[in-house]
Amino acid sequence: MFQDLVKKSRSYRRFYEEKEITMEQLKQLVELARLSPSGANRQPLKYVLSASREKNKEIFDTLAWAGYLKDWDGPIEGERPSAYIIMLRDKSISKAMSIDEGICAQSMFLGASDLGFGGCFIGAINKPKLMKVLDLGEEYEIALVIALGYPKEEVVLETLNTNEDIKYYRDEEGVHHVPKRSLKDLIVQYLDN
Amino acid sequence: MFQDLVKKSRSYRRFYEEKEITMEQLKQLVELARLSPSGANRQPLKYVLSASREKNKEIFDTLAWAGYLKDWDGPIEGERPSAYIIMLRDKSISKAMSIDEGICAQSMFLGASDLGFGGCFIGAINKPKLMKVLDLGEEYEIALVIALGYPKEEVVLETLNTNEDIKYYRDEEGVHHVPKRSLKDLIVQYLDN
């Protein structure tokens, strides 16, 4: 059932790093992005795929993890992502952020869950540094990094009461809790006959 | 298979308007958005759901359809959407466009296909007019309209050669063609061992 796929597609930040994700799997994910709708059909997004140990390390060093976990610097060696998809804006097609970024990101994210692994969207990127690591031309701008791997942590959704704090947290057993607003708080009007 | 769901989730603009979409189905779609990841877990998006004939008409009058089809003013009566989800930014939570918009939009869009209907993301909105139609408070900003219905048209994907025109078009039989860039054109680097 599709809802189960959405439910299990959580943001994971600790992985079985030794479990490989293949270039073929990464291409399957980009194919899902390719098949997704695009604003005015412009399709301004391009991708870099990394399943290289060496490059993964360099990419990792440009990322900041889990802003709300102040006493955690991100996954330790051995628990880091096995692969990355770096989403780029091709500025020769479109300069501004577009709705496409989230659309394509979510298609790939759900696709990763469907293939049995998981990931995390990372927006806190040292972009100039990552531009250098990837030796990208000026026509590109980094939009998002999708870190991918086989999850090595448990993530649990909690229901948030109105106006409670939205910060996620990790409990003493290392379980990651994510408070989600209730459906009641999300729907502001029902217009029915 | 998840790829089949993505493949069949095309942008449809003509519907069997008489086929109803229920409030329960619309709520199921918002539940998918609710379960989707959110940047810094802020969850700034709120929703208005319409399955009301009368309100649908008023919402329709604020929308512009299919910019590239110059000789088409949008669906005629009887082929219009059966329901709408209007996505709002709650400015008291976050003012700017965020990646959440596309993420949540795509979760709902795929969910609509999974439930057997379809839709179209519409960004060309007379926002002041729609704000009035919905009588929305100043804390909200309209992000996107998702038009929903049971598709009454065929949509076919075509593969685009590099630098060809991305404009979608409708052929003499009324089939809607959408040129998509090739995977080769989307992936700019493969970093493998």
Image (cartoon, coloured by chain):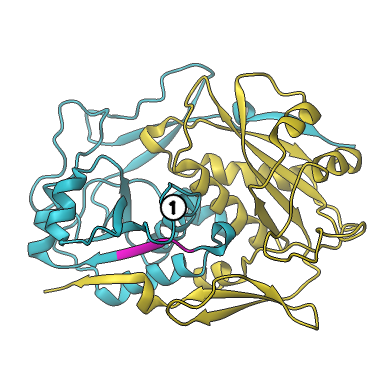
Chain colours: A cyan, B yellow
Mark 1 belongs to which amino acid?
Glu
**Quadrant showing the N terminus of chain A:** bottom right
> Which of these two is toward me, A38 or B102?
A38
| Side of B64 where A84 appears, left or right | left
- Is A44 one of the magenta-colored residues? yes
Q: Answer above or below: position of B104 versus B117.
A: above
Q: Which residue is mark 1?
A: A101
Is B168 displayed left or right of A169 in the figure? right
Is residue A27 at all visible to an observer of this figure?
A: yes
> Which sits in the foreground, B85 or A153?
B85
Task: Report if residue B187 lies within the magenta region.
Answer: no
- Is residue A80 visible to us here? no
Secondary element at image label 1: helix
Q: Main secondary structure of the magenta part?
A: strand
Q: Which residue sits at x=82%, y=58%?
A: B73
Q: Nearer the viewer, residue B19 or A15?
A: B19
Q: Chain of mark 1?
A: A
Residue at x 78%, y 72% (from the top left corner): B153
Quarter-of-image position of residue A47: bottom left
On-image quarter of the C terminus of chain A = top right
Q: Give the image location of residue B56, x and y in percent.
A: 84, 43
**Looking at the image, is B116 positioned above or below residue A63?**
below
Count of picture labels: 1
Q: Is residue A101 above or below residue B138?
A: below
Q: Quadrant of residue B76?
A: bottom right
Farthest residue, direction top: A163
Magenta extent: A43-47
Image-based side of A25 in relation to B97, left or right? left
